[in-house]
Image (spheres, rainbow, N blue to C red):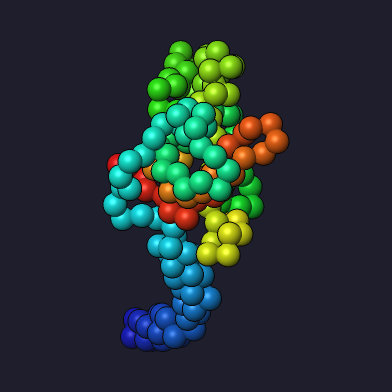
Amino acid sequence: MWRVIIVTFSAAALCAAGCQKAPDKGSDSAANAAAAKASQHVLAAEPAGAKAVREVRQSAKDKEPVTMVGRIGGTAKPFVDGIAAFTVMDVALKPCEDACPTPWDCCCDDPKELQAGTATVKIVDAAGLPVAADARKLLAVKELSTVVVRGKAQRDEAGNLTVLADGVYVRP
């Protein structure tokens, strides 16, 4: 009797093991594609000559190459949905304290100082088009991560600064 039970359980276990679904190759290729995309934009070494957000915002001309250092934040929702873009703030701006749920928005600072010390970063491909990926996953960053961005300045009519980034270094 015990032999029958053991043989039955063994056969069921073998059948279950043999019927398991093979790993999804699509998941592997999606992960590989994401890693390849990230490697195109993540810099292995920090670029030299990075200037603070405030300085770049004041001096950069439209389409001029820039290297800028900043901290992700300056607004309650610094990441843009659907594309690899985010807001950075000058490292001199201090995140809010006192158990603030979104310390990276710097709502404790003077709004004029905050505006003068923020810029948008948009990661672009070789054709200059925005990368359709979540920047948090692409760069392995989050709010208050310090990044050094290399790219070209883009100005709008109001003087706001966007850096069209071809490379980002994430400081440890």
What is the x, y in percent for residue 19? 49, 83
From the viewer's perspective, is residue 57 above or below residue 172?
above
From the viewer's perspective, is residue 13 above or below residue 103?
below
What is the x, y in percent for residue 78? 56, 36
What residue is drawn where x is 37% and y is 86%?
7
What residue is drawn where x is 40% and y is 22%?
92
The quadrant of the picture occupied by the C terminus is: top left
Q: Tell which of 124 and 66 is nearer to you.
A: 66
What residue is drawn where x is 58% and y is 24%?
115
Figure disc tally: 0
What is the x, y in percent for residue 80? 61, 44
In the rendered view, does 112 fall on the left or right side of 167? right
Q: Residue furthest right?
A: 157
The image quarter containing residue 161 is top right
What is the x, y in percent for residue 38? 44, 60
From the viewer's perspective, is residue 157 above or below residue 166?
above
The quadrant of the picture occupied by the N terminus is: bottom left
Residue 104 in view, yes or no: no
Q: Tell which of 29 and 132 is nearer to you.
A: 132
Q: Tell which of 29 and 1 is nearer to you.
A: 29
What residue is drawn where x is 47% and y is 55%?
166
Residue 36 in view, yes or no: yes
